[in-house]
Structures are given as structure tokens and as C-alpha cells.
């Protein structure tokens, strides 16, 4: 009898969590579709108005590729690289291309951004990560949205460029694309102050450099966007595919866990909507090992059925989300991915939690 009540109680909780997750995914898909259709219509931009800030450390291999992309923009941009105490030829590579480089006076991305902001003379500034690539109309598309929406910040989509033959890389592209589905829809509706510093544009005069909390190692984009939202400023989403930027996948599970642990560690610096989603993801992934543990511990068929049903339904919902990422962002998906995605996703979440629990989260040798 006690066993039956346990299955009923956990089954009820699992059903409610799945229902909440399903409603969340349905809203994500609808909102992302609306965001993708909200293309602004304004007059062509006639003059350079944008400074691109690139804070970087030890990016000698990646930075020249991004700088060449920026130098080939259809709208001229000023480029400013802020070197965060690199140990390689990052500075020399940028200067060889005629790009201005300054030394960050502090340590970390936030200190670099603050130093860069003080040097901006144009009405708009953007932040990009050194390991990204972008198309020739990126600047034009981002500025177009900023001007038409009278926005203080514009966020663009970031994609993980995957080798379609690699299931490992496809998973990262799908998972990140699914997150972008949620972000794009909620930002476009004014419900979220979250994006990626790898593809953001700001009004220079509105950029809240004083709110970055330089003493905290991560979360520059989250702190800046939350400050703007709290001030009632407009944060817009750029739906143009020409504004997408591509970045690299992680090389290993360890690297991916570290990355996601860094992101999770800055959740407290973001808005309520972000924290709610983090709790939603936590809830659904806590239930899976609990049911798996009970199935192994008791060897009861009822527990195995509950676990199997829960996992299948979650996989279906996850499949809907990555299908949206495929349709809206061009994320590569193969049939086998619909089966394996939820397993890999759970492993990613649990691994990130383990890294946080160990307190060993680092970025390029620096403790977070």
C-alpha cells in the first residue's frame, strides 16, 4: 500500500511538471515564430554609427577571422579590441589587421567592457565574442532594428556551428538553438531581459556600465540587460537571419559542463523569468534520477512504467523544441537525434550541477 501511494504521489508530481514543461514549450514555439516574422522596415543606414567592442583573452587563432568579417561589413563599423592580459599573439594579430587594441585595466570580461565603453564615440556600440563569425549585413541588420524600435539594446541570435556528421556537435547546436527559441520569443514580447554577449548591440548613452558588478566573474550581459529593463528601456530582438552569428561547439563533455555551470552561476543576476525557467529545467531533471533510482531499488514494474512514460513524453516535448530550432535557425537535426537528445540533455544538466557542487568552475584558467 505504501508503495502504491508513493507511485501515485510521484506520478502526480511528474504529470504536473510535464504539463508545465509542455505549456512552456508551446509558448516558446508560438512566440519564437512571431519574433521571426517581426522584420522592421526602415530607410537604409547612410553613415557609420557603430563601435564593436571585442573583449578577449588568448584568442589569437579566432580573432583575425572575426575582424575580417567586420572589415567586410556593408555598413562601416569601428572596431575596438580590449585585450584581457593575453598570453598569446592576440594583440599582435589584431594590430596586424589595422585594428585598435587597448589593454584592459582589470581582469575579466566586465572590466574589459567598462574600459571599452569609455572609448566609444559613436551613438551605438555592440559586443561580440572573439570566437564568433558573422555575415556582411550583420551590422546593418542590428542597427536597423535598434533605430526602428528606438531600443536601448538589441539582441541577435547565436548559433553553434555543427558538423552535421557529428552527433555530439549536432546535440550542442540543437540544445543551444532550443534555448534561443525561448529567448527570442520572450525578448520580442518584452517578457525577458536575457541574451548573449556574443551578439548584442546597445545605445552607448544607455549602456549601464555601472551595473555590471565587476567583482562578480560572470554575467555581463545579464546584469546590463536587467538594469535596462528595470529602467523601463526597450530591449528588442533582431529576427533577421543576416544578424545571426556562429560560434564553435565545445570539444568535450567536461568543457560543456564547465560552460553551462558558468552560465548557471550567474542566474541570480538575471530577471525573474530566467530564474523561473532555470527552476523548471531543474524540476524536470530532478525527477528523472529519482524515478530511475526507485526502479532499480525496488525492481517494481510500476516504477519502470512511470519512468518510461515520463521519459517518452519529455522526449516528445524536447523534439518539438528542437524542431522549432531547425525550422527557424537552420539547426541540423537527424532522426536519431529525437531519440538521443533528452538523454544527452540530462547528462549535460547533471554534469553542470556536479561542476557547481565541486566548486571548480573555471574560464581560461581563472576560477569563477
Image: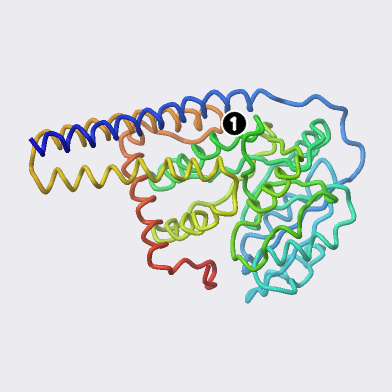
Q: Nearer the viewer, residue 204 or 89?
A: 204
Left or right: residue 325 versus residue 193 is: left
In the displayed structure, 271 sits above or below 306; it is below
The percent coordinates of residue 29 (x first, y second) are 51, 26
The percent coordinates of residue 137 (x first, y second) are 75, 38
Q: Which residue is mark 1?
A: 185
In the displayed structure, 36 sits above or below 94; it is above
Which image quadrant is residue 302 in? Answer: top left
The percent coordinates of residue 306 (x first, y second) are 19, 33
Left or right: residue 294 versus residue 264 is: left
- Looking at the image, which residue is at 67% across and 31% down? 239
- Looking at the image, which residue is at 88% across and 46% down? 49
Q: Nearer the viewer, residue 115 or 165?
A: 115
The percent coordinates of residue 264 (x first, y second) are 49, 54
Binning the other alpha carbons within 10 Å of mark 1 as few (below 14), some (14 to 19) or many (20 upward) gives many
Total number of numbered labels? Answer: 1
| Secondary structure category for the residue under label 1 | helix
Work out which residue is located at the far right of the displayed protein and give it.
47
In the displayed structure, 78 sits above or below 282; it is below
Q: Which quadrant is home to the N terminus?
A: top left
The colour scheme is: rainbow
Amino acid at each position: 500500500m505504501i508503495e502504491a501511494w508513493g507511485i501515485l504521489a510521484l506520478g502526480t508530481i511528474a504529470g504536473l511538471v510535464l504539463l508545465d514543461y509542455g505549456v512552456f514549450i508551446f509558448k516558446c514555439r508560438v512566440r519564437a515564430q512571431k519574433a521571426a516574422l517581426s522584420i522592421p522596415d526602415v530607410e537604409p543606414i547612410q553613415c557609420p554609427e557603430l563601435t564593436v567592442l571585442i573583449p578577449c583573452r588568448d584568442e589569437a587563432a579566432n580573432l583575425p577571422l572575426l575582424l575580417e568579417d567586420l572589415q567586410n561589413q556593408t555598413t562601416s563599423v569601428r572596431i575596438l579590441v580590449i585585450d584581457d592580459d593575453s598570453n598569446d599573439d592576440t594583440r599582435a594579430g589584431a594590430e596586424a589587421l589595422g585594428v585598435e587594441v587597448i589593454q584592459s585595466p582589470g581582469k575579466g570580461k566586465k572590466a574589459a567592457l567598462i574600459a571599452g565603453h569609455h572609448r566609444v564615440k559613436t551613438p551605438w556600440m555592440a559586443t561580440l565574442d572573439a570566437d564568433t563569425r558573422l555575415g556582411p549585413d550583420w551590422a546593418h541588420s542590428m542597427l536597423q532594428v535598434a533605430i526602428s524600435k528606438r531600443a536601448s539594446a538589441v539582441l541577435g541570435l547565436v548559433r553553434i556551428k555543427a558538423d552535421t556528421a557529428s552527433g555530439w556537435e549536432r546535440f550542442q547546436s540543437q540544445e543551444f538553438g532550443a534555448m534561443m527559441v525561448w529567448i527570442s520569443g520572450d525578448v520580442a514580447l518584452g517578457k525577458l531581459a536575457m541574451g548573449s554577449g556574443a551578439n548584442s548591440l546597445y545605445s552607448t548613452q544607455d549602456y549601464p556600465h555601472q551595473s555590471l558588478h565587476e567583482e562578480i566573474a560572470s554575467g555581463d550581459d545579464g546584469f546590463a540587460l536587467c538594469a535596462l529593463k528595470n529602467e523601463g528601456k526597450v530591449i528588442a530582438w533582431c529576427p533577421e537571419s543576416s544578424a545571426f552569428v556562429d560560434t564553435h561547439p565545445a570539444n568535450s563533455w567536461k568543457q560543456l559542463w564547465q560552460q553551462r555551470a558558468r552560465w548557471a552561476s550567474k542566474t541570480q543576476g538575471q530577471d525573474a523569468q530566467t530564474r523561473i525557467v532555470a527552476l523548471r529545467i531543474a524540476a524536470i531533471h530532478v525527477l528523472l534520477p529519482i524515478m530511475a533510482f526507485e526502479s532499480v531499488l525496488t525492481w517494481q514494474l510500476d516504477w519502470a512504467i512511470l519512468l518510461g512514460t515520463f521519459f517518452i513524453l519529455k522526449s516528445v516535448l524536447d523534439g518539438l523544441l528542437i524542431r522549432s530550432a531547425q525550422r527557424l535557425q537552420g539547426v541540423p537535426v537527424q532522426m536519431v537525434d529525437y531519440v538521443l537528445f533528452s538523454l544527452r540533455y540530462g547528462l549535460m544538466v547533471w554534469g553542470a550541477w556536479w561542476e557547481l557542487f565541486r566548486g571548480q568552475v573555471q574560464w581560461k584558467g581563472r576560477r569563477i
